[in-house]
Amino acid sequence: MDIAAPRYDTNWPSIRDEVSAEEWKARCELAACYRLVDAYGMTDLIYNHITLRIPGTEHLLINLYGLLYKEITATSLVKIDVEGNILWKPDTDYGINKSGYVIHGAIHKARPDVAAVLHTHTRAGMAVAAMKCGLLPLSQTSIRFVGHLGYHDYEGPAVDLSERERIVADLGPHDALIFRNHGLLTCGATLQQAFNTMYQLEMSCRAQVDAMNSRTELLVPDEATLAKTAHLYQPGARRPYGVLEWHAMLRRLEAEQKNSGYPPYAI
């Protein structure tokens, strides 16, 4: 039986002149972040979500459920409230993924310090999420998360609003969370910081899977070194994460999208 494809048009007119300058900037940054998650191999077909709070509001931006990350543009993003009510979306049959606002809305609502939330289902992230030991401090990258990482036990697909309180409690004050048997989540005071944290968490998981697959004895630094290193890698102890590399990554996107066949992200 043929299933009709939802109505979708990549040629929506830009809404740049219909929104505030702050919202347009947020839209461009979030669209770029979706493209970067794709560029660094952290996508899962059309699934998962990244949200960004529009400055000065309680409204969030999220992706249309049905688009590849490399298709997302500033105009294609949907504006919602923390309860998932759609305030604006392009003229299309696509909607949003319920898990997006169940998970993300809960964190945005409970953590006013959080501007952005990323959630992924990567191969390495899911592998570590299935390990009883969780993330091990096997590399300098993973040591960043010692004492700064939460865990949330699997309760099935995140569509039950009652799970929100438990997700928030398990995240606590941290900027990173492993959903056991599920995937990874990071958040941050800026989108750039949240992306950097996800990139580092993903690299930590990949390194752990590779190291454990080597079938040799693994080396873990002593507790004093772990504590010192984890402290030195916290945002408050150094330049905020994401600042230095963000514009370099945007240059990468702009160079690559010229011949990609996909629309530029900032339209």
Image (cartoon, helix red, strand yellow):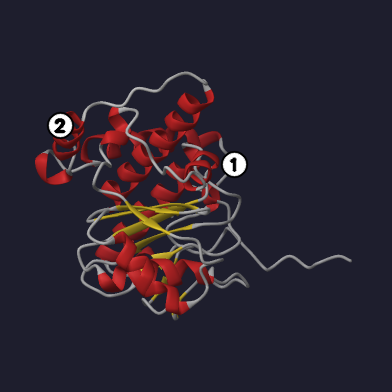
Which image quadrant is residue 200 in? top left
**Amino acid bearing label 1:** Gly
User: Where in the figure is residue 149, as x and y percent of width and height?
Assistant: 30, 49
**Amino acid bearing label 2:** Ala
The residue depicted at 53 percent of the width and 42 percent of the height is 127
Q: Is residue 192 positioned above or below 20 on the image?
A: above
Q: In the displayed structure, does residue 196 sit left or right of residue 218? A: left
Q: Is residue 166 positioned above or below 45 on the image?
A: below
Quadrant placement of the C terminus: bottom left
The residue depicted at 37 percent of the width and 63 percent of the height is 16
Pointer 1: what residue? 261
SS at mark 1 in the image: loop
SS at mark 2 in the image: helix
State whether residue 22 appears in this view: yes
User: Where in the figure is residue 17, as x and y percent of width and height?
Assistant: 35, 67
Pointer 2: what residue? 224
Q: Is residue 91 positioned above or below 202 on the image?
A: below
State whether residue 18 appears in this view: no
Between the C-alphas of marks 1 and 2, the distance is 51 Å
Circle 1/circle 2 CB separation < 8 Å: no
